[in-house]
Amino acid sequence: MDKSSDTMASPKNDGSVDDNNGVDYVVHYKIPAKEKAEAEAGYVELIRALTTVGLASEVRRASKDSLYVFVKIASSDLLQKQIYRARLQDWLHGVRSASPNHDVAKTLESEPVTEAERLRLVYLMMIKPENEGGAGLTENAGKWKYVDAIFPLQNRAFNKEWISNWSGKWLLEESEIHDIREKFGENITMYFVFLRSYLRFLVVPSAIGFSAWLCLGQFSMIYTVATCLWSVIFFEYWKKKELDLAVQWGVRRVSEIQQPRPQFQWDYEQEDPVTGEAVRVYPPMKRLQTQILQVPFALACIIALGSLSLTAISLEIFINEVYNGPGKQYLAFVPTVILVVCTPIMSTGLMAAAKALTDRENYATVDAYRAALIQKQFVLNFMTSYMPLLFTTFVYLPFGHVLIPALDFWRRTAQTITFSKAPLATREFQINPQRISAQMFYFTVTAQIVNFATELVVPYVKQRALAKAKEIQAKRSEENVHDNPEETEFMKRVRSEYEMDVYDVTEDYREMVMQFGYLNLFSVAWPLAPCCFLVNNWVELRSDALKIAMSCRRPVPWRADSIGPWLQTLGVLSWLGSVTSSAIVFLCSRDRDGERGAASNFTGWGLLLSILLVEHFYFLAQIIVRTVLDKLESPGLQKERKERFQMKRRMLQDHLGQDVADKAAAPGIETSEKITRASLEEEARLTSIRGRSSPAEIFWQHQQGMQETIDVGRMFITQMDTKNGKQAGAAQPSPRA
Ligand SMILES: [Ca+2]
Ligand SMILES: [Ca+2]
């Protein structure tokens, strides 16, 4: 025991970060002035719940109306148990091929605890429902509505080294991938590896695109075929690659260990007819009724965003290609301004609707919920990103003349606005085949530069400004919270990390997947696009690293064995690419002979297009049927599931003994209190032996045990009463002698 706790005490083998005073998570707890009594009761319950599952806590004042509760796992012994249990569970779910060694110390020796593993387990201890042995915390919901945020602290030393390593390097190296995985978990590492593979693959279409630009010009069939082939190869390569990574990282099938959603509401409990397990059921038909609402939702998206784009596009065509009067160069910005102002407002509204709809669909697991939400987001993004280009390809180029009524409308409107009797200076409308190239230039160059600014620069500046403003405000109102002198720096950092944005890896995936779509669907109109993407992504790899390290809160290091729903999206886009690129080539290459838009062309391309559409509709139907069939269980699968379930239960009993298994499943108050006290006594003893304590030890000695954390927190809450901040400014109690 002594020996193992010694090895655990060294900073290397318990995954804790010294620089962070050993803090695993920070819980930001709000105390709204009007609901103080309720918040105080909730606070007491919070500390009790944390202690019950074996987490030690320290409380500090965050601001004039909130608290920070610092959380760490109570003892190295409990950490070891948690790790052993989690690894055993992985093995039972088929994630690991070998069972962990009975001797916990040996398991840890052969496979040391990483920061990611530790943080993931502690997070699970906090958020798992109570019946599964967790504290059942949720952010801003239900009985934990005052818990505003739960986040780990950044490992500054690692981040600094990681970022400074980037200079003078072309791509991520294997050793770095290993480091990112240990610090940020497989979910984020998967994104970086995906981005790296995509970046490497981009070299091929860049080279093809560059030579096509030099020798073949736009709308080249050879280029289309080459990119289609490339996208199919990339898609198939990545499918293999992610499987390979999952096996290498020991996370294969990890997506099957599904994390239950705390918001899930079930109608009744039922025995699984196959395994006999009790399962909570929400009738699928009931869910389907809500899912049907997706149809009007998609229609609303198409109508709202479609009419917005139509307005902007026709106005833009009118100003650029028909209007010939004064101020043309300034007026040209009007449609862009309309789009820039209205698109985010509409998308935000529709996004909120998508979220509400997904909430109502009431999914049982976090993964299913996320996948459903991403699907809806994809519809929205598809509309906002590709609509202008699709419009040009399928309406403007082939049927340009149908726009004439719309253009007349703008002409009349302009006439009315200007009150002029003289006819507006216009020229005859002619379809401009270069329009699609100009749009592609906008989406590949301008939009990506704007994105770089909004993704990295704006949040960083915003966070800095906000922190500064709060500091000034606090000084002026003299309600400044006084930290313990030795903790000032640390508390300042915690506050600044709290102000940061929450990192969401889906945002980064979305950006890359949409870019992949531009490349496949439209780059034939401007073959230099892949070169621009190559440059952008080289920067992206660095700026995304910078974003995670500097301008976002540290994300919870989840595991992942795939890029998830994005894989399917990639497949769809790669298939759609073959349709649109060939249509663009067909419509535009002929246009150079001057026959463009003529009605005589209609039958020819209409026929071709309908054949293509029907053929691809068939493929789409095939995909849907395949997905549905995948969800049904075959008798063989049922048998396997039953056997696996029985083996799991047997193994769990054999390995841990019924007693330990029960305890680990739902640790009672006594168990963990004993752990807390024992570990604190041990800590105090070690401190007295060493004579001098480290800052982290001092940090955790301010409050000893649950009751003191509760008392000090309640004292802080009471202090918040005093209006003039005389008492509120009082220093925090100093550590015990
Ligand atoms: Ca970007
Ligand atoms: Ca990004």
Image (tube, grey):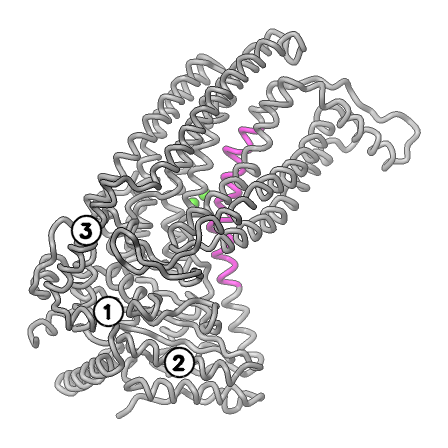
Residue 214 sits above or below residue 260 on the image: above
Q: Which amino acid does label 2 sit on?
A: Glu
Q: What residue type is labelled 3?
A: Arg
How many other residues sit within 10 Å of disc 3, few (<14), some (14-19) or many (≥20)? some
Q: Main secondary structure of the magenta part?
A: helix
Q: Distance between the residues labelled 3 and 1?
A: 20 Å
Q: Position of residue 343 (x, y in %)?
A: 62, 44
Judged left or right of residue 644, residue 124 is right
Where does the C terminus fall, quadrant-wise? Answer: bottom left
Q: Name the residue under label 3.
A: 644
Q: Which amino acid does label 1 sit on?
A: Ala
Magenta run includes residue 461: yes
| Stretch of the chain drawn in magenta | 439-465
**Which residue corresponds to the image point at 64% horizontal and 19% vertical from the top-left?**
432
Residue 266 sits above or below residue 134 on the image: above
Depth order, front residue of 219/461: 219
Q: Mark 2 points at which residue?
A: 45
Judged left or right of residue 191, residue 9 is left
Q: Where is residue 492 in the image (x, y as percent from the top left)?
A: 41, 72
Q: In which quarter of the image is residue 385?
A: top right
Q: Name the residue under label 1.
A: 665
Quadrant of ligand 2: it is top left
Residue 88 sits above or below residue 350 on the image: below
**Which residue corresponds to the image point at 23% horizontal and 81% vertical from the top-left?**
676
Q: Position of residue 574 (x, y in %)?
A: 41, 28
